[in-house]
Image (cartoon, rainbow, N blue to C red):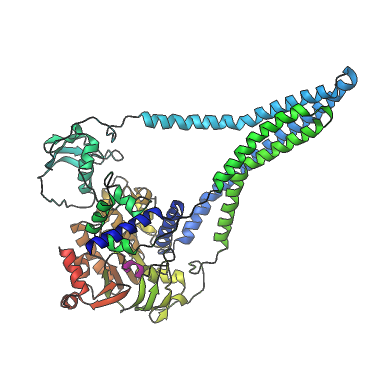
Amino acid sequence: MKQRNQKHLAGKLERLRKQKKPKDLVEAQKKQKSFREKVASFNGENRAVSLYDKHISKTYQATAKEGAANGFGMGSVFLIIFASYGLAIWYGGQLIINKGYSGGTVISVLLAVLIGASSLGNAAPCVTAFAEGQTAAYWMFETIKRKPDIDAYDESGVTLEKMNGDVELREVYFSYPARPEQLIFNGFSLRVDSGTTMAIVGESGSGKSTVISLVERFYDPQAGEVLIDGVNIKTLKLGWIREKIGLVSQEPLLFMTTIKDNILYGKEGATLEEVTQAVELANAANFIDKSPVITPIATGWAAVAGKVYEIFSCNQGFLVTYYFQILHWAICQVFFALLLATTGISQTSALGSDSAKARDSAISIFEIVDRKSKIDPGSEEGQVLEIVRGDIELRHISFRYPTRPDVPIFTNLSLSIPSGKTIALVGESGSGKSTVIALLERFYDPDSGNILLDGTEITTLNVRWLRKQMGLVSQEPVLFDDTIRANISYGKEGEVTEEELIAVAEASNAHQFISSLPQGYDTYVGERGIQLSGGQKQRVAIARAILKNPKILLLDEATSALDAESEHVVQEALDTVMVGRTTIVVAHRLSTIKGADIIAVVKNGEIVEKGRHETLMRIKDGVYVSLVELRSN
């Protein structure tokens, strides 16, 4: 039975590898979904549009000036060209009349001058391209020739015949190159004996993940040593070290390819059987087996167009030679017309690819502009409740994501959440816990069934008003490439006072670490908050949600990235703001969910168990009991 399941899973992996969605479509959908949900949850669409308009207006002004300059320049060039044509023909006529030149000689000279001048003119853009290419090539070759301090391709260094696995950091001093003034380790020492499991704990930003970075030699310490089996890792072959270390990061990075190819990155030359075994050990076989097979889309028009143009270009040269040989001075006028036409066609065909791209882009843009969104946050339609109690009810919900219509998420989900109560949603990964939050925020509408707020169908409510009543903290917090101040302030429309800002930062246990930064609240977090640790990002996101002062709290693994101490403090803060508010918590940690008023277990698209922690634990062979035992083990 097990062997048959392995073969079935192996076949599934192979089909997923061969039949995959186009990369650009996957990336576009990923970015669109992330932007829509994070911005929409804070009613930030208008702010995003205003910011875009502000930046695009500068681009528009510059482009308009550039267009005017290009138009004047091209007009001047063609004026000179056609004036030269007229002058050459007039002077040629004078030579025929007064000097006895033949018409053929004049036309030959005229064509030679015109073709030479045209060729030189057409070569001018290529000179610019060559200059740009030379500049790009310079930096590329500089990068290629650069010898990094830590070279993954360096074959030097020793390898140990037998590796026991003793790891030691001895008197390590380290600060990140991007922040040299902020010392992470100041004489840090640690020893982990072979076969020992060591947990490193501490506040967010204290340097826990930095230990892993130093052992993997992503960085070298400024002073001190990192040793494996008593040997300084600087003396070991880098590729060999990394082959011996398996890394699972806080925010796992998957490449934009198939599941199989992502797993194969873990070992060079791994067999399909090894992949299958690894999938089963990681408890991933179940969801992979349910993954849909996506038919690839392929187009070859660009290649065809390029080949046609290549053939045409070759034939153009042949035509010029041919006509020069057979035409005499009379039907030369005809050749001149043909030459101009051929040149025009050649230039048009060169722009054919760009024209097609421009047409497709314009069609796409106008489709988006003209599209009437089914869920429009900018619409003024829909009613507004005078008083919000926070009673939520989901009735017989069926739902499939638009991008995966063949994978049912909910088949008949019903759930009632009383006002002011805290409900925790638990279940296996992919069971649809976070989907409940997405439906409440109206990022999507269910295929069938009803969602009610205080007895009112939410599809009849104003979307913008509805989202103002909810504060969302997602599993993967998205911070904008701006200051901490701006990211927290994004949670509230209008002006935010310094007192409000500090109050929510303190409530989310973020004020202390923010104040310790050199620029404080004016510190730039980088793209997607890359300059902050995972716990710091999460606390900023929590502060942003608290600032909104919502009637309903939606916490999707809100404390999952925090260390034990920070989680405790933030959980206390959340417990305080939960009072009098309806709260929906998606979590895996028992400490987070056991105190909830209601725990709802999601499985196979339905709520299969519901009650308090103590009640569910008394259900023999229950789903909740098995989940608790699994996490305890």
Q: Residue at coordinates 11% horizontally, 42% vertically from top-left? A: 164
Q: Is residue 624 left or right of residue 417?
A: left
Q: Is residue 45 left or right of residue 627?
A: right
| Residue 569 drawn at (x, y percent) | 21, 61
Q: Is residue 279 visible?
A: yes
Q: Residue furthest bottom?
A: 455
Q: Quadrant of the N terminus?
A: bottom left
Q: From the viewer's perspective, is residue 605 above or below residue 270?
A: below
Residue 465 is inside the magenta segment: no
Residue 434 is inside the magenta segment: yes
Viewer-nearest residue: 388 or 330: 330
Q: Which residues are magenta?
A: 430-436
Q: Quadrant of the C terminus?
A: bottom left
Viewer-nearest residue: 403 or 552: 403
Q: Residue furthest right?
A: 97
Q: Is residue 253 visible?
A: no
**How many discs appear?**
0
| Residue 592 drawn at (x, y percent) | 22, 66
Q: Residue at coordinates 22% horizontally, 38% vertically from top-left? A: 240
| Residue 394 drawn at (x, y percent) | 36, 77
Q: Is residue 241 left or right of residue 135?
A: left
Q: From the viewer's perspective, is residue 167 above or below residue 514?
A: above
Q: Quadrant of residue 19?
A: bottom left
| Residue 383 drawn at (x, y percent) | 47, 77
Viewer-nearest residue: 172 or 142: 142
